[in-house]
Amino acid sequence: MRPLPEILDRIAETLALSEDRGQVASYIPELAAVDPRQFGIAVALPDGTVHSAGDATVPFSIQSVSKVFTLALALGRLGDSLWTRVGREPSGQPFNSILQLEVEQGRPRNPFINAGAIVVTDAILAGHAPRELLGEVLRFVRTAAGQDESQGLIRINEAVARSEAETGHRNMALAHFIAAHGNLQNPVEKVLGCYFHQCAIEMSCIELARAGLFLTNAPGAPRLVSPSRVRRIGAIMMTCGHYDASGDFAYRVGLPGKSGVGGGILAVAPGRAAIAVWSPGLNARGNSKLGTEAMEMLARATGWSVFG
Amino acid sequence: MRPLPEILDRIAETLALSEDRGQVASYIPELAAVDPRQFGIAVALPDGTVHSAGDATVPFSIQSVSKVFTLALALGRLGDSLWTRVGREPSGQPFNSILQLEVEQGRPRNPFINAGAIVVTDAILAGHAPRELLGEVLRFVRTAAGQDESQGLIRINEAVARSEAETGHRNMALAHFIAAHGNLQNPVEKVLGCYFHQCAIEMSCIELARAGLFLTNAPGAPRLVSPSRVRRIGAIMMTCGHYDASGDFAYRVGLPGKSGVGGGILAVAPGRAAIAVWSPGLNARGNSKLGTEAMEMLARATGWSVFG
Amino acid sequence: MRPLPEILDRIAETLALSEDRGQVASYIPELAAVDPRQFGIAVALPDGTVHSAGDATVPFSIQSVSKVFTLALALGRLGDSLWTRVGREPSGQPFNSILQLEVEQGRPRNPFINAGAIVVTDAILAGHAPRELLGEVLRFVRTAAGQDESQGLIRINEAVARSEAETGHRNMALAHFIAAHGNLQNPVEKVLGCYFHQCAIEMSCIELARAGLFLTNAPGAPRLVSPSRVRRIGAIMMTCGHYDASGDFAYRVGLPGKSGVGGGILAVAPGRAAIAVWSPGLNARGNSKLGTEAMEMLARATGWSVFG
Amino acid sequence: MRPLPEILDRIAETLALSEDRGQVASYIPELAAVDPRQFGIAVALPDGTVHSAGDATVPFSIQSVSKVFTLALALGRLGDSLWTRVGREPSGQPFNSILQLEVEQGRPRNPFINAGAIVVTDAILAGHAPRELLGEVLRFVRTAAGQDESQGLIRINEAVARSEAETGHRNMALAHFIAAHGNLQNPVEKVLGCYFHQCAIEMSCIELARAGLFLTNAPGAPRLVSPSRVRRIGAIMMTCGHYDASGDFAYRVGLPGKSGVGGGILAVAPGRAAIAVWSPGLNARGNSKLGTEAMEMLARATGWSVFG
C-alpha cells in the first residue's frame, strides 16, 4: 500500500477532472447554492493523525450523516429497547419513502432512513427541551472529534435548519404518519424542530473523519459506546447507510458508511481509520457522486474492504 | 479467544438444550421429514484444518446456499455483464416475493432471492445441456471443498429435486414472470430443472465449510475467483444473504452469510475462516433458528465480526 | 312494490333487532361518544315528499359524505381542469391510505378518498378565506336541501372540527405529502382547517336525503349542476364512494352512494329518489354496518338498482 | 333521441376519420396481425332487433369479454360460494398485475382481472374434461345469442388459443402463483388450457350484442341467470370491467361494460339494450380506443347512462 497522503492526493487529482459531478440537492435554497466543484477527503487514524486532500477544511451540512451520531446516543441511552420502535433491516426504498410505513404500521424499517431517524430523535428527546437535546448532540459529536465548543468548528447552521422547517413537507408527512400510529412521544413540531437542526450540523471533512474514529473500535480511538454497540452500528451502516443504494456501496467500497444529502459520506475501516469525503453533487439515489467514487478508489488502494 | 474446538463444543452443548427450534420447512415432503433435533457446526481454516461439533458429518440439502456457488460461477463466466439482468440491492422482501419483479419489470433485486438466482442459473445455462451445467456446478463446489466425485460427499439428491419440481408453484410463477419480461434466455422448464437440482445439492457442514474457504481471500485458501470478486460476493452476502432478515444477521453476527431453507448457513470470516452450521428448524423469516444463534455465539466468542 | 313508508318501517324494525352493529369510529372523542343504537333512514322524492323511519331527525356528523358536495362545487367552479390534480379511478385501498400517493406522485386516485378530497378543498379554497369557503359549502348544501340558514338544521359542529384538527395526524400526513409534490396551492394548515370543518357538517337523514335530490337528475329536483355532471358524480360515487368496499356496495345495493365515518350514507336512485341512512356503528371497511344493510334491503324492496 | 340506426351510422362515420386509433395488442401474433382500421358496432334490443354499423359482421377475438360469460356460468353453478375464492372489488391495478395476489395471498380481487378469471375457470372446470367445459361455455354463449352450433358464427380460434399457450408467461405466472396459495383445484396446465381457449372465442359485434341481451334483465330478453344475479354481474362490470380504467369508463359512458384485449367491448343498458363495439387499437390501459369513444358517443346520444 502506498502512503496515505499520496493516495488521497491522487484521488483528489483524479476526481478534479470529473465532468459529471451529479446534481446538488435542490430542495432547500441553502444546499442548492453550494458550489458543486468542491471536493474534500480526510482520513483519521486512531493515533490522532489526520491526512486530507482537497477542500477538507471547508464546512458543509452533514445532513443524514448526523443519523449515525443520534443513533449512537439513542443506543447509549435506551439500549435495545429502541428496537421496539424502529427496525434494522434495509428498506429497499428511497430515503424519504412513506409506503413501507403504511404497510408496517408506523414502525420505520431502520434508523437511517428519514422516518427511522425521526423516531430516534423522538426517543432521545424524551424529557428534554429541544435546546438541551441539540446541545447534547453537539457535545457528543465534538467529544468524538476531540473538539470543544470554543473552537467553533462543529456547529448548527440556523439558516439551513429554518429552511428545512419551511419546505420539509415530506418529513412532516412522515412524522405525522408515525404520530398517527402512536410511535411519537413528543409533539410533531418539536421532534421535527430537533431533527431539522441535527441535520443542519456543519463541519469539515477533517472534523467529520475525527468524529467517526469512535466507530473503528481501534485501540486509541475515543470510546463513546461499547465495542459491541460499535459493531452493531457498523452493521446498520453497511446494510442501510446508503438507502436503496446500500448494496451498491457495500459492493463497490466494502466499508460501513453513511451518506447525507449535503454530499458528505462518513465511512469506517474497522480497527484502522475513519474516512470522510464531501462533494455536493449527488447521484440518482441521493448519495454524493464523487464521494462514492472517492471511497471506492480509497478502498481499492488501501485494501481496507471488510470483505477480505 | 478460547481454542476453537472448545468454543464449538460449548455452542453445540448450549444449543442442545434449546426447546424452541423453529419450524422445519414443510413445502416439500423430503425437507419436512428431516429430524429437527439435529445440529452441526464446522469451521474450516485456510491451512486446511477443520474443527466441528454436533452433527457435522450428516449431509443436508443446502438449498439456497447453492446460490453463492452459482453466483461465483456466473461472475467468473459473464463478469459484470451479469448486472444488466439482476441487481445487487437488498430487496426488503421475503425470499420468494414476486411483487418487486412487477414494479421493476422482471429484473430481480439481487442474486440471492429466488427470482435472482433463477436468472443467474439461466445466465450460466446458456449453451449447455442441464446435465452439463449441473456437472459444472458440482465440480465447482467439489473443487472448492477439495473433494473429488469418487468420494461421494457432495451430490445431488434426485428425490428432493423431483419433489421441488412437482410442488414449486411459487418458483414457477417467478420464472414465468421473468420470462414474460424477456429476462430468461432458456425455456422456463429447463431453467427451473437446473435450479431445483442445484438447490438439491447435499453435503455436510464439514464439506460446506471447506467449500466456503475460497470466499475468505486468505492466503492458502483455494482461489477460484479473483480477490476483488470474492470481496464483492461477500458484500452481497452481507446485504442480501438472509433475505429480509439480512440486516438482523449483520447486526447479530457481523459476517457475510447465506442461508438455505434446508437449515444450513454458510458464513465467512474474511482472511480467517469459513463456517457452516446446520439445524433444520427455521425462524419466521425462513432462516435456521439455531443456526443463526450459533453464528452469533461464534462471532462473539471469536471476535470475528468484520465490524471491529 | 309496497308503499315506501311501509318499506322503511319494516327496515327500521328489522334492523332494530340487530345485535352486531359494528364499531363506532373511535379516533375522535365526539364521534366515539355517539350512541350506537341509533338508526335513521329517509327517502326524498323529486316532488318534495320525504318518507322516513327511525332516528331520521337526529343530526349526525356527515364526515366524508361532504365530499360529494365539495366535488359538485369544485366541478361547477373549475370544470374538467380539476382532473389534472386528482384522478377518478377506484383506489383499491383504505380511505386514508398514503402509499398510492407515493407511487403516483401526489395525485390522489379519486376525490372521495381523503387525499383526493383534500385536493378538492384546496382547489375550491383558492382566493377565499376559509370562512368564505365554508359559508359557500354550507350555502350549497342548504340550497340543495331547500333550507335556509335561519332554520339551523344544517350546521358545522365546531367541537368536532377542532377535535379532528388536534388528532388528525393521518390527514396531516396526507396533506403534507401532497404539498411535497406541489399539488396544494394553499398552506397545509388552511386547507386542513377547511377540510376538518366541512367534514364536521351536521344534519339529519331527512335533510341529507333532501340535499341529495339534485343528484337524481329527476324532473322537479333542484338543478345545481348540469345533468351531464350529475351523471359523472354518480359514476364516481358508484366506483369510489365506499373506498375499498365500493365494489361490494355496488354488488349488494346497486346504487351510487357515499359513506362517511360518522355512520351516514347518501345514495341516489337516478330519476327517482335520494336516500339517506345513518347508524354510527361501522364495519371493517369503515362504512356504516346497518346503513349498508338498510340500503341493500331498500334496493331489493324497491327494485331501484341501476343494474336492471 | 334520434333513431338508433342514424346514431350508429353517425358514430361509425365520425370514428372513421380518427387518426389515432391506439395500438393493436402485440403479445400474440394472431392479434397483432389484425387490421387496425376496422370498426364495428351493434345494438341488440330485447325484442330481437339488432342495429349495427361498420364492420359489425366481422368476427374478432373476444378475449376478456369472455369473462362475463364464465362468471355467469360460475355463479349459476356455484352460487355465492364462488366469493370465497375471488373478491369483487376493483383492483386499481393493470389487468395482468400479480402484486396484489402476493399481498392478498392468492385470492384475486375480482373475476374480471386475469387472475380472477383463471380462478373462475378453475371453479367451473371441476369434474369436467377441458373439452366438456369449453363445450359448455360455447353452448352458453350461443344460447345467449340465440345461435346454434351449425351456424358457426361463434367458435373458438385454435390458432389464437395455441399462440397464447406458447407466449402467455404472464398468465402462467398468475396461475402458478394462485396454485402456490392453494386456490386452484385443477392442474395449472389444464386450467390455462381452458382459459386460453375461452379467450379465443370469436364472434362478430352482432353476435356479441345478442349474447349480451340476457344481462339487460329486460322483458323478452333471454333469461339465463336470475334477475338478481344479472344485477350483480352488472355491478361488477361497472366497477371492475375495464381494469384500472373502470372508473373512467363509468365516468364517460355510465354503463356496465367489459372490454377485451382483442378490441371488443360489451356494454349493457339495463332494461333497454346490449351493445357491442369492436376496434382493434387499444389505449394505454389496454381497452379499445375507438370502442370506448363509440360507447361514450352512444351513451350521450341515447341518454342510456344508468346515472340519470
Image (tube, coloured by chain):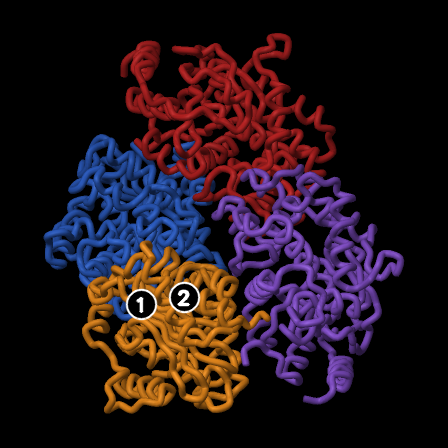
Chain colours: A orange, B purple, C blue, D red
Quadrant in the picture for the C terminus of chain B: bottom right
Q: Is residue C212 above or below residue A308?
A: above
Q: Earlier in the sequence, mark 2 or mark 1?
A: 1
The answer to which image quadrant residue A214 occupies is bottom left
Q: Are marks 2 and 1 on the same chain?
A: yes
The one nearer the camera, A151 or D4, is A151
Q: Disc 2 marks which amino acid?
A: Ala
- Mark 2 touches mark 1? (CB < 8 Å): yes
Q: Is residue B115 left or right of residue A163?
A: right
Answer left or right for C265 relative to A7: left
Task: Tell whether D20 sits left or right of B124.
Answer: left
Mark 1, chain letter? A
Type of the residue with mark 1: Phe
User: Label 1: which residue?
Assistant: A39
Residue under pointer 2: A294
| Residue at 75% in and 58% down | B141
Callout 1: helix, strand or loop?
Answer: loop
Q: Is residue B6 above or below residue C226?
A: below
Q: Chain of mark 2?
A: A
Say which residue appears at 42% left-offset and 14% top-offset: D38
